[in-house]
Amino acid sequence: MGDGLPGGRAAALVRAAAGGAIDLVLPPACLACDAPVGQTGTLCPDCWGRIAFIGRPCCARCGLPFAIEAAEGAICGACTRAPPVYARARAAFRYEGVGRELILSFKMADRSWLAPRLAGWLHRAAAPLLAEADLVAPVPLHRWRLLARRFNQAAVLAGLVAREVDAALVPDLLARTRRTPPQTRLSGAERRRNVRGAFRVRRGRERLVAGRSVLLVDDVLTTGATANACAQALRKAGAARVDVATLARAVRDPP
Ligand SMILES: [Zn+2]
Ligand SMILES: [Zn+2]
């Protein structure tokens, strides 16, 4: 961040960097829409109404929210049919409405100041997973995409949540073995094919993984294909367990 910021964003960046002191000059703005709010680092009432946080009950494995009451430990149909490679995935909110807008603007490097607030929500959603993690690692971006985007938002989030718990951050634990086309327009089966074998534990990092609990951090869980491909690589290297924490989660058909 830093160069070429449009005026409004530059002001917001200054506001975020300076914290409370500068609120006297620049009134705090909503994280999503820049409307005035009472306090820095929050959403306006309208945006609060359009962000869908995920709570209980949810699938014990993939974190899919259940629309009806379910017993603790209940598992969704998809996870029953095809159990994921990872142990548990949890997300802070649904990938829709304001949640989606926040993630898309966070991906633009000039809104990286959203990171601490987003990491706070991620931490809350994945607290039990974080508590049991030995290592925290981001899902890696391919270096070409990293260059285009200037920063890996998953790595930023992983760094912030690892700082809150007694887990070691290993930013370069995983590497991409090849460049994969963006998953956005692919079906579930295509996504699985697209990322199969696309990740490996980076050479020299295997000894860190053996017998350890790893928490993978990413921005969005869609079909879980990427999370599974990463978990596969980590399990192959001897990880005792792989959990996944994402900011958002796609929810297609609420059960
Ligand atoms: Zn707003
Ligand atoms: Zn599930």
Image (tube, rainbow, N blue to C red):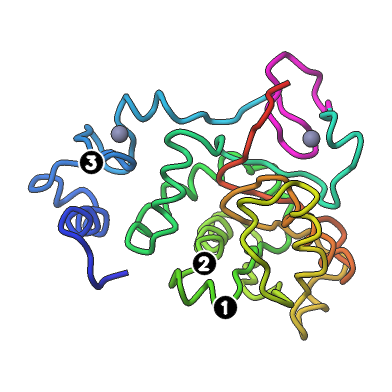
Label 3 amino acid?
Answer: Ala
Label 1 amino acid?
Answer: Arg
- Image quadrant of residue 36? top left
Q: Which disc, if any, is residue 29?
A: 3
Q: Which residue is mark 1?
A: 143
Q: Which residue is mark 2?
A: 152
Badge 1 or badge 3: first in the primary sequence? 3
> Is residue 8 covered in magenta?
no
Q: Compared to 111, does 71 lie above or below?
A: above
Between the residue at mark 3 and the residue at mark 2, the CA separation in whole angstroms equals 25 Å
Q: Residue at x 64, y 43 (%)?
A: 126
- Image quadrant of residue 232? bottom right
Badge 1 or badge 2: first in the primary sequence? 1
Q: Position of residue 83 (x, y in %)?
A: 89, 42
For discs 1 and 3, the disc positioned in front in the rendered view: 1
Between the residue at mark 1 and the residue at mark 2, the CA separation in whole angstroms equals 10 Å
**Image quarter (top left, top right, bottom left or bottom right) of the C terminus:** top right
Sort mark 2 into few (<14), some (14-19) or many (20+) by Cα contacts within 10 Å: many
Between the residue at mark 1 and the residue at mark 3, the CA separation in whole angstroms equals 34 Å
Badge 3 or badge 2: first in the primary sequence? 3
Q: Which disc, if any, is residue 165?
A: none
Q: Position of residue 37 (x, y in %)?
A: 23, 33
Sort mark 3 into few (<14), some (14-19) or many (20+) by Cα contacts within 10 Å: many
Q: Compared to 93, does 219 lie above or below?
A: below
Q: Position of residue 46 (x, y in %)?
A: 32, 25
Q: Compared to 41, does 215 lie above or below?
A: below
Q: Residue at x 66, y 74 (%)?
A: 179
Q: Give SS at disc 2.
A: loop
Task: Provide the residue span drawn in magenta.
Answer: 57-74
Label 2 amino acid?
Answer: Asn
Q: Give SS at disc 3.
A: loop
Sort mark 1 into few (<14), some (14-19) or many (20+) by Cα contacts within 10 Å: some
